[in-house]
Image (cartoon, grey):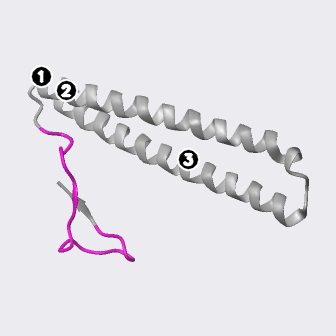
Amino acid sequence: MTPTVAGMRIARSVTTLESELDNLLAKSGELLAEVARARVATGVEAHTMQQPLARVANVQRALVGARSELVRAHRDLSNLAQKMDLGVICPQVAELNDSAPHLDGVTAITA
């Protein structure tokens, strides 16, 4: 495997994991909201649901910490790719490209 191919594979894996962590953060937020809404809707006493709410909040905190570490790793890997003269694998800035094809309301992001 060449360094360029390795860099491309790592870049794809990092960005995939970033997206998956973002999805987990969103789902944990949805769970937190559902638990709170269920408590209100069912009339369960607030103290009864405090522990589960705190545990889900701790999950979110851990996910944010993991996401922060992944962003740091992404930066480190990008710096290494530059030092190895692998070219720009990850764009410094991404922006919405309104002229790109749209799929069901999704706009492409380009560098």
Q: In the rendered image, which quarter contains the C terminus?
A: bottom left
Q: Determine whether, in the image, residue 28 is placed left or right of residue 93.
A: right
- Rendered position, 57 above or below 100: above
Classify mark 3: residues with Cα within 10 Å, few (<14), some (14-19) or many (20+).
some
Q: Residue at the spot x=91%, y=52% of the render?
A: 45
Q: Does the magenta-highlighted stretch encompass residue 4? A: no
What secondary structure prevails in the magenta region?
Answer: loop
- Rendered position, 57 above or below 93: above
Q: Amino acid at mark 2?
A: Asn
Q: Amino acid at mark 3?
A: Leu
* Residue 99 horizontal/vertical position (percent): 17, 74
- Between discs 3 and 1, the one toward the N terminus: 3
Q: Which residues are magenta?
A: 88-107
Q: Does the magenta-highlighted stretch encompass residue 98? A: yes
- Look at mark 1 in the image and give the residue it sits on: 83
Classify mark 1: residues with Cα within 10 Å, few (<14), some (14-19) or many (20+).
few
The disc label shown at residue 4, or none: none
For the residues marked 3 and 1, what is the alpha-carbon distance in whole angstroms?
A: 33 Å
- Look at mark 2 in the image and give the residue it sits on: 79
Quarter of the image where one finds residue 76:
top left
Q: Determine whether, in the image, residue 13 is placed left or right of residue 65.
A: left
Classify mark 2: residues with Cα within 10 Å, few (<14), some (14-19) or many (20+).
few
- Could one spot residue 88 in this view of the protein? yes
Q: In the rendered image, which quarter contains the N terminus?
A: top left
Disc 1 secondary structure class: helix
The disc label shown at residue 24, or none: 3
Nearer the observer, 25 or 110: 25
Disc 2 secondary structure class: helix
